[in-house]
Image (tube, grey):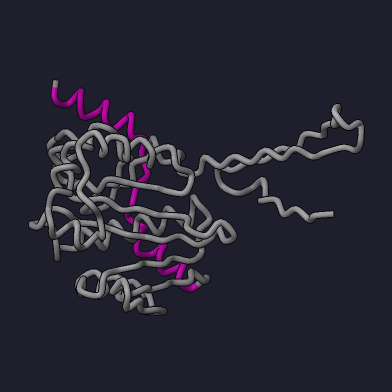
Amino acid sequence: MPQWSLPPQSAPGCSWSILKTFNISTGFGDFLSVSFSCQTMKINQNTVLQGKKVALVPYTAAHVPRYHEWMKSEELQQLTASEPLSLEQEYEMQRSWREDADKCTFIVLDTERWSGQAGMDEDCMVGDVNLFLTDFDDRALGEIEVMIAEPCYRGRGFGKEATLMMMFYGVTKLGITKFEAKIGQENKASICMFRKLHFKEVAVNSIFEEVTLRLDVNEQEKHWLLEQTGHMEEKSYRDMKLQNLTSES
């Protein structure tokens, strides 16, 4: 008889249920019908993480046109190993990411422009940061990536703060205890940043010209991460948007 391993009910955003049924057609035996659902990556749909330089907000349809313009850049396509998409395909991608239980995406905003000047999200967009759950057998492993798309914001600590805040969110909200970053070998700046965040190189793929860096979040690393993000505030996205609209009027 096969042995089944079920995820814990306590997994963030996940639930499972068992229904005992009787096979009417054969009249033999009882069967267990297992229903498993995981909506982990929808838990950030009303979440703002606000730091000193960046604010992380959910990726919505309103962000797609600006994101689409970014991804026309051959440089960004190369750095992110992406293919150019049409605007409609980009909208479809945004919808699929929002529904995908294995992806968590935030748009990176310039927090000063967004909160200080009550700007619209699209006017304050800097890049994005993502977490992917790539190993179904190990839901505590998250692949992290960050893109600072606006050239004038690079080299100023925006990517570092966005990455630290996403790591904090992954550890405290999603149960992530191990991070991996896969970066093109030519992207020296990104490799250097992740090394400063205590990631260690664990593999090199010469075919894809890619370096894999990894961080295991033990208690010491967790304490360090909490220190680095102690200034961060978590807020309601709907409340912040309403506040901005009120300020504009």
Residue 200, position in %: x, y?
38, 78
Residue ID at (26%, 70%): 184
Quadrant for the C terminus, please: top left
The reply, left or right, for residue 213 in relation to residue 18 is: left
Provide the major secondary structure of the magenta segment.
helix
Q: Residue furthest front?
A: 26
Residue ID at (21%, 58%): 158
Quadrant for the N terminus, please: bottom right
Residue 226, position in %: x, y?
41, 62
Residue ID at (40%, 54%): 131
In the displayed structure, 85 sits above or below 3; it is above
Q: Residue furthest left?
A: 152
Residue 216, position in %: x, y?
48, 71
Q: Nearer the viewer, residue 46 or 207?
A: 207
Residue ID at (12%, 53%): 73
Q: Is residue 245 magenta?
A: yes
The boundaries of the magenta stretch are 220-248
In the displayed structure, 15 sits above or below 22; it is below
Residue 59, position in %: x, y?
31, 40
